[in-house]
Amino acid sequence: MFKEQNTIKDKAAIVGIGETQFAKQLPASETELACKAISAALKDAGVSPSEVDGLASYTMESTSDFELAKNLGFGDITFFGQIGHGGGGGPATLGMLAMAIATGQCQVGVAWRSRKRGNPESRVWANKAASAELVTAANWSRPWGVLRPVDEVSLITQRYMHETGCTRQHLANVAVSIRKMANNNPRAMMYDKPLTTEDYMAARWISEPLCLYDNCLESDGALAVVLVSAERARDCNSPPVYLHAFGQGISQQSHSMVNFYSENPLQGPSWTCARQLFRYSDIQAQDIDVAQFYDAFTPLIPFSLEAYGFCGHGEGAAFTEDGGLDINGKLPCNTSGGGLSEAYVHGFNLITEGVRQLRGQSCNQVREAETCLVTASTSVPTSAVILRR
Amino acid sequence: MFKEQNTIKDKAAIVGIGETQFAKQLPASETELACKAISAALKDAGVSPSEVDGLASYTMESTSDFELAKNLGFGDITFFGQIGHGGGGGPATLGMLAMAIATGQCQVGVAWRSRKRGNPESRVWANKAASAELVTAANWSRPWGVLRPVDEVSLITQRYMHETGCTRQHLANVAVSIRKMANNNPRAMMYDKPLTTEDYMAARWISEPLCLYDNCLESDGALAVVLVSAERARDCNSPPVYLHAFGQGISQQSHSMVNFYSENPLQGPSWTCARQLFRYSDIQAQDIDVAQFYDAFTPLIPFSLEAYGFCGHGEGAAFTEDGGLDINGKLPCNTSGGGLSEAYVHGFNLITEGVRQLRGQSCNQVREAETCLVTASTSVPTSAVILRR
């Protein structure tokens, strides 16, 4: 039988976080942005670049591991890995590093995401992803006009509304709750732009039933975290935030980007991921103080509330009522403004905000937050982590 | 301090291997080839596809994890990861799965490689890799005519010859020794094509000092392995081959594809990898019974002999003399014919051959082989595993 002491539970800790500015367009290259974010994270941790020996990133990352190692003066790297599926990947970069640290494959790990929408480098990678997808799942939907991620999510949202009674008001609740978080966060791209339900209802369609405010931002920026073993964490500058549990999920018969063809299209990869996440976790859904849910689109929040067990199936929409996601709500969510209102960097800003909450340093601090769930997209092969103080 | 019982040592075992035919051109798609190889590996193990919950592959793999899961009827997948850098990746797919199994993130892992040189799918990925590289290291060499991998390896080989006294005869020793292995392996593409030193010396240059026979084959084909926990392995059809140790390496200041700009260009990623590989290993270089070295080009064999400690620096060429790599030599190498003479599938056939050796099923069986080293390319961010019976 598998011995529970062999899990990665609390064996690695995040001891450094770093970010660049977020904006619609930044002049620096993706490599430069990555270097800035990683340097800031190492400084935050009080760890020398020469100690770094583990690296994890998204497959769509355009800055290579060896390029960073050269530019930043890392030591000999003894673990490096990548994780596919775009927005499904963020927490998995942490999970991979935690596995490597827990098993002695490396000692100081760095995970990062650097992104520029307008950069030709990025376009190469976007084209690659698109081409790979074209030969598979998308063959069945592209010819019928399901072209953009938002079109795929709008279809599944329509089904969700039909089955559960979710309305546009519920999606507005998500957009407005998360925007309020951004309005307290000077680093958020939407810091000085309040959003009301009226604004939401008056906005143009992007892909019905999803309007402008159901969609995340388009951002340039980079972020990084530094992970070390729990023992090493005691000697770092910043208080350790432990990686308590890690899950990934591809559900049976699921496609990327969405899950139209499986028996229950409303219960996809995140449901699989949640089972693995909580399997060896001492912290269950009812013990989570604050959540950072991947929010490329508003309906992913009710989907995630259901997947990770904060409510029953079909109850995610109602959970958003009466400020359920607000700072004093049932489950404070996306407290930096998330992808909808802080910046869209494939969910990596959800990780750094999770760390800030457990350090007591958030702009929207949840009082005495001890545990934080960080998830990736519900629509693709996905991942999640539980962080604890 | 890190506890050695937390390493992955012997915690996972390869219990199934599967391969398609190897040929210059195969009619089936890469997805179809991957499915065939994986099905064969599962059958070999006596494991049902529905038990598979972990997947690892190269980033250049064009068949996606979820596509395989759908086509083959896998269960819910709870671990999936990828490894970059082309021929540096093979052993790392095993290492990643072993980490995931050892830490409870999955129970039955599949690693695979499927490749068709002539396939438009593959070209997309090759272009992607080329584009990413162009913005970085290759900026410094492409304009001077260093266009192909063989050009990069020929430069470093020239330097190696200059420094160590390695001659073309030594490279011929490698090509001829490995070809003899293929001549005993009916599945090898070069099975019925003997090679003499005279043939070698008369061959045309590809990139001086490297001639035709210093280069690997171009092959279509797919391979797969199944890994499970050491406990689960006892219930499988085939005798378990334990993953004893795993290493990866990016050396300081190293570039991909080669290591021209570092202090010692002749000691690159494989040297870093070897240190990590042997760090927690009970099996050291002198205990290795048979080796499968990544052999896209003949000089990578002397480089690897030195990197993994089978001889001192500069002694790799002499090691090939007097049939040093032959079945009764100092270290029998690439016993299926490797990339040079069986098939070039980014080194994955070295893994399956390593397993056959430890099962006693090789066409060139090393008597009572108990331990096998399998390595990836010396020229890029790399990986290696030690397998044991």
Image (cartoon, coloured by chain):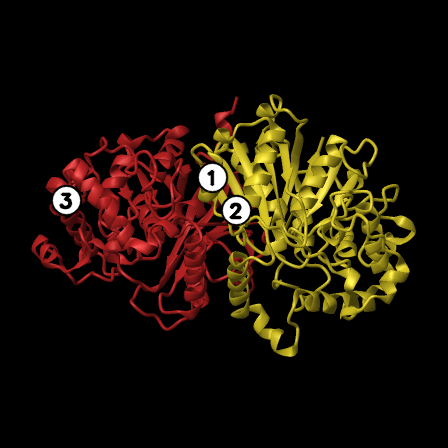
Chain colours: A yellow, B red
What chain does mark 1 sit on?
A
Residue sitting at x 65%, y 68%: A148
Give residue B360's position: percent from left, percent from top: 28, 46
- Residue A282's quadrant in the figure? top right
What's the amino acid at mark 2?
Thr
- Residue A329's quadrant in the figure? top right
The residue under label 3 is B170
Q: Which mark is residue A71?
A: 1
Q: Quadrant of the C terminus of chain B?
A: top left
Label 3 neighbour load within 10 Å: few <14, some 14-19, many 20+: many
What chain does mark 3 sit on?
B
Q: For the residue labelled by badge 1, is the local secondary structure a helix, a strand or a loop?
A: helix
Name above or below for residue B93 compared with residue A73.
Answer: below
What's the amino acid at mark 3?
His
- Asked whether disc 2 touches disc 1, contact meaning CB atoms under 8 Å apart, the reply is yes
Label 2 neighbour load within 10 Å: few <14, some 14-19, many 20+: some
Q: Residue furthest left?
A: B198
Q: Give the distance between the C-alpha atoms of the residues marked 2 and 1, in whole angstroms.
A: 9 Å
Name which of mark 2 and mark 1 comes first in the sequence: 2
The residue under label 2 is A31
